[in-house]
Amino acid sequence: AQSVAQPEDQVNVAEGNPLTVKCTYSVSGNPYLFWYVQYPNRGLQFLLKYITGDNLVKGSYGFEAEFNKSQTSFHLKKPSALVSDSALYFCAVRDEGFQKLVFGTGTRLLVSP
Amino acid sequence: EPEVTQTPSHQVTQMGQEVILRCVPISNHLYFYWYRQILGQKVEFLVSFYNNEISEKSEIFDDQFSVERPDGSNFTLKIRSTKLEDSAMYFCANRTDGYTFGSGTRLTVV
């Protein structure tokens, strides 16, 4: 069965500093990996995905993520955080051959001015 | 950019009542999903729908839940006899390039 772990409930970072939100996954086949952001009382907004190809994936709003097969990780990164990046971030995986996305528990990112 | 539209945005219902949540998917996308999220917590898979049939469902999607396409295009999620623990945000989604989610229906069971 596929699963996702987001080990940090909350990440605090100062504006202008780099940020990392961690994600590890477990699948039986090839992983399709996704990051979503959720602002209060809003839906899930797609940030980026990894299907195949380059391990470094660039997405919306300056975010990127690095796929590491040996460590089964897909950490979300941004070189310089903004206060407006403060939100709830979800990592998700779909196992090749299955249809559903499985989500992690989410990480709250708090960027201080 | 194509959108998935959900109605209503918020519904309050009494325990034991039936509720119907509605979703207008993106046209011509065959894969469709319902998820729920309890109070800003984990997003949980309920059911997937492919080519007019349920393709997968979770343990949460028991006999009190059903999904239909009443007019061949829109989708509904019906909860027959709501319980307090059904209070959650319910999201529908299409499988697009990155899975497109609707803005959700907040269901409050009192």
Image (cartoon, coloured by chain):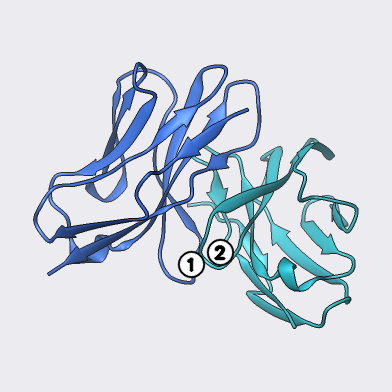
Helix, strand or loop at label 2? It is loop
For the residues labelled 2 and 1, say whether their Cβ atoms are less than 8 Å apart: yes
Nearer to me, A66 or B59: B59
Mark 1 — residue? Answer: A42
Q: Residues within 10 Å of mark 1 (few under 14, many from 20)?
A: few
Can you tell which quarter of the image residue A73 is in?
A: top left
What chain does badge 2 belong to? B
Nearer to me, B57 or A26: A26
**In the figure, what tint was chain B given?**
cyan
| Count of numbered marks | 2
Up-down relation of residue A60 to residue B15 (above or below): above
Mark 2: amino acid: Ser
The CA distance from mark 2 to mark 1 is 6 Å
Up-down relation of residue B28 to residue B8 (above or below): above
Mark 2 — residue? Answer: B103
The x and y percentages for residue B62 are 85, 51
Nearer to me, B59 or A67: B59
**In the figure, what tint was chain A given?**
blue
Q: Residue at x 28, y 63 (%)?
A: A86
The x and y percentages for residue A29 are 56, 16
Taking B103 as reference, is A38 left or right? left
Q: Are marks 2 and 1 on the same chain?
A: no
